[in-house]
Amino acid sequence: MGKTLFEKIWDQHVVKTIEGGPSVLYIDRHFIHEVTSPQAFSGLTKRGLPVLRPKQVVATADHNVPTLNQELPIKEELSRKQVEMLIQNCKDFGVELYGLGHPYQGIVHVIGPELGVTQPGMTIVCGDSHTSTHGAFGTIAFGIGTSEVEMVMATQCVLQTRPKLMRINVNGKLKNGVLSKDIILYIIAKLSASGATGYFVEYAGEAIRALSMEGRMTICNMSIEMGARGGLIAPDSITFDYLQNRTFSPKGNQWTEAVKNWQTLFSDQDATFDKEIFIDAADIEPMITYGTNPGMGIGITKHVPETTEIPEKEQQNYTKALHYMGLEAGQPIKGQKVDYVFIGSCTNSRIEDLRLVASFVKGKKKANNVEVWIVPGSKQVEKAAREEGIHTIFEEAGFILRQPGCSACLGMNEDKIPAGKYCISTSNRNFEGRQGQNARTLLASPLTAALAAITGKVDDVREYVGN
């Protein structure tokens, strides 16, 4: 019997399996940030324990940092305290920190891949649910809780129950104007926000293989939004080309040997999954959410579902979501007014995203009623954007290129959407209050967001780039 990609990596990392219980899983890379690490460091201090393998821990500041004037003291007291604690803890425990001002600073799930820290075949954890992003490289990557962060710091292992396995095949060719973000929003809308609960998902099919690494990261990033433990994609030549010559990628003979090993990371033809789903890429159009979870998504030409289209047991929550969003059942989503556009987050803040947006808005001006925030995912992305003149294109369009951080994805910093305002966001969650108290979030691709910045409303990008 053949093995799935997940099983190959899992089996190589199991230290011990507890009969009738979880497995002790060895962790290759542990990413930490300022929000979920303080309690873990405090726990180690109380127990008199060191970080067992500090060289396998990578720390950065991202959630609480401002994205303007980062050279100045952080204004919000809690944010400032958490960042200061991260600095002190990393110093005390010998952990490498890419803090504010460091050329490698950025969103944790952006810097890992771009620096070559993330590599195929690894197990990767972080006290952050969107750790599944790293699965795009053929890794088992998942978020953990604060107590587990402490466990990994102390032992380089974590207790995990083996999940069920699902494969989602996306075959065929995407239509023009349809991006990886549209693929994953379509999948989540199809399965629901809990449709993959208990599963680790492998994405396959020719439409997935055709994606860039940035596109694959967007797909895996949002696996958690349908309840999955994580998502992964088998590495291939696109993966290897992306990783070659990255700062921490293997070099010389080690690179050759690494690629040889990575080429064995795929699901065997006779491997079996607990569930398998097939999707035709041609069925996917630009997607956008209308409600308060990522599963409440529709194609850009569709209407907000009628209440009768919703299962009876979900109708009460559905009505509540529409009330919060200020939308009505049956109304078309196209033409909906937009107040803010946020292009950033660990889902869509890489240099490819910024290049795509810049190519679309070049020579255009933003709508007068819209404020646009472009937040690069890292200092490396920001540097590339400036070196390539992307920042000038943005400025001429009336956009603001800010400094790296999680920004308006989650409203833990100064970047919050005002109450009642509509924001088209390239982030991953549209929960109530996620981007600010009573803010209204519509999730979409960078291209759909860029178009809204120009027209001031939800629009179909295919009418501007061709079908």
Image: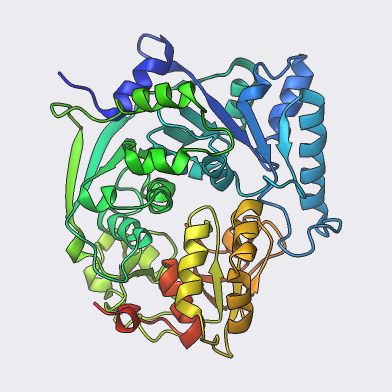
Residue furthest toward the right? 73
- The image quadrant where one finds the N terminus is top left
The colour scheme used to paint the residues is rainbow
- The image quadrant where one finds the C terminus is bottom left
Viewer-side residue, 264 vs 24: 264
The answer to which quarter of the image holds residue 8 is: top left
Tell whether 63 sits left or right of 256.
right
Q: Please give the name of the residue rendered at 27% of the width and 71% of the height, measured from the top-left corner.
A: 176
Asked if residue 297 is positioned above or below residue 37 in the image, the reply reads: below
Position in image of residue 155 (x %, y %): 60, 15
Asked if residue 311 is positioned above or below residue 146 in the image, the reply reads: below
Position in image of residue 33 (x %, y %): 66, 40
Position in image of residue 28 (x %, y %): 52, 23
Asked if residue 388 is positioned above or below residue 218 in the image, the reply reads: below
Q: Please give the name of the residue rendered at 57% of the width and 60% of the height, measured from the top-left corner.
A: 409
Q: Please give the name of the residue rendered at 33% of the width and 29% of the height, measured from the top-left corner.
A: 163
The answer to which quarter of the image holds residue 153 is: top right
Viewer can see residue 144 = no
